[in-house]
Amino acid sequence: MATTIKKSAPKRRTQSERSQITQEKIIQSALHLLQTVGYQKTNLQDIALGANVTLGAVQHQFGNRQTLMEQVVEAVMAPLATIGKGWSIDALQLPLSQRAHEFVHQAWHNVYGNPSYLAAWSLFFGSQNTALFEKINLHRSVHDPIYFAHFVEVFPEVDQHHDQPEQFAYVIFSALRGIAVMRIFDIDEAATQMQLEVISQMIIQAGSPSQCN
């Protein structure tokens, strides 16, 4: 006699999980619009349409356009805070050259090379002289020193051999940012990879004993 196996019903998502999924869809829709039509033309109605949710759902999740845009900034920049933090002690003991290449690769893959990063810059430029821009600037002033300090933790050799390690970190992140922004033009991908290699070499040189004053 054949045995009938009952299929268990799929686990229902909690309200919190459903809310998170909705928020992610809305943020991705906002990023797409920022990239394609710019900050000034990105409105809640079109964001809702792109996320396949109602305007009321957008307002329920974020309240207003400014709050949503603040969350967009957070979503774009959040991966930067995690680069290298998940490395084990053994990974941090890798040779400087290997660590430098891995750090630059992760920064580019997770943040700067992502299309959402350019979308965020549309938001930055478009919101100048507004309360939103002030919020973004505050975010930068709070988090940039954290990113720079984390860079020094990942590269203690730079801390040892460079007389201004956190300022050097600023230069590295600025270089990555500049390469990313230039992608609004038709940039050769091979050239981009060579530029990333130059940044890796800058880190290696800064962490080498020959840099010691």
Image (cartoon, helix red, strand yellow):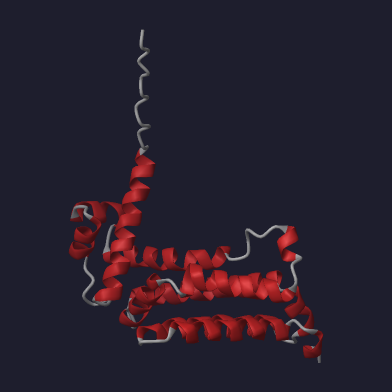
Q: Residue at x 51, y 64 (%)?
A: 79
Identify the image quadrant of the N terminus. Answer: top left
- Is 138 situated left or right of 3 in this image? right
Q: Residue at x 71, y 74 (%)?
A: 155
Residue 183 placement (x, y as % from top left): 40, 83
Specify the quadrant of the image occupied by residue 55.
bottom left
Q: Residue at x 67, y 82 (%)?
A: 203
- Is 206 situated left or right of 113 in this image? right
Specify the quadrant of the image occupied by residue 209.
bottom right
Instruction: Name the residue furthest bottom.
Output: 213
Residue 89 placement (x, y as % from top left): 74, 59
Q: Is residue 145 visible?
A: no
Is residue 42 or residue 177 the one in the foreground? 177
Instruction: Name the residue furthest top.
Output: 1
- Is 105 situated left or right of 157 in this image? left
Q: Is residue 7 visible?
A: yes
Instruction: Name the residue furthest front.
Output: 1
Q: Residue at x 33, y 62 (%)?
A: 28
Residue 174 placement (x, y as % from top left): 53, 84
Tag count = 0
Is residue 153 or residue 184 the one in the foreground? 184
Is residue 69 or residue 151 the one in the foreground? 151
Residue 98 placement (x, y as % from top left): 69, 72
Identify the image quadrant of the C terminus. Answer: bottom right
Is residue 79 or residue 201 the one in the foreground? 201
- Is 100 situated left or right of 179 in this image? right
Residue 67 lies, with reference to residue 213, above or below; the image says above
Residue 88 lies, with reference to residue 4, above or below; the image says below
